Amino acid sequence: MQLLLSREPRILLVRYDQALTIKTLGQLDRVLTKFVQREGTMDTIFDFSSAPRTDVPTSVMVKRGQTLSHMPDRQRIFVAPDDVYFGMFRLYGAYQSYRGAKAPDVVKSLEEALVLLGGQNAVFAPY
């Protein structure tokens, strides 16, 4: 997992290049908690373009969808070109919106995500 930051516009890009598992989701939670403590919240793109396919139980995505986001009141976008990931993140989003939070967007490419955030000219650097 790699964190990249654009200071102008303020966008966090999380590149996920490992299998999505309960363990790696816990690692993501710890990384995001530390990030928010240092930088505050900001619009975030979670890019799963390079993540190998994995089978995360539906119950895990439902449970995560029922928890509060690390970036409340910020736009969150999942990049999921793989249909399995795309469906998992749509499920997660359905449970987020059920709790009253804005559901994250799920798109097929990083370019689509940047357009949604108006960040086509964003320059990302390792965080």
Image (cartoon, rainbow, N blue to C red):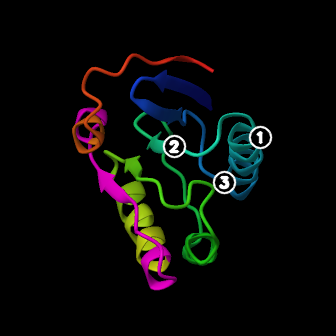
Alpha-carbon span between mark 2 and mark 3: 25 Å
| SS assignment at label 1 | helix
Quadrant of image for the N terminus: top right
Q: Which image quarter: residue 50?
A: top left
Residue denoted by label 1: 34
Residue denoted by label 3: 21
- Verify whether residue 63 appears in magenta: no
What amino acid does circle 3 point to?
Thr
Q: Position of residue 90 (x, y in %)?
A: 37, 67
Residue drawn at 36 percent across, 48 percent down: 80
Relative to residue 39, is residue 96 drawn left or right?
left
Which region of the structure is painted magenta?
A: 96-112
Residue denoted by label 2: 42
Alpha-carbon span between mark 3 and mark 1: 20 Å
Nearer to us: label 1 or label 2: 2
- Verify whether residue 97 appears in magenta: yes
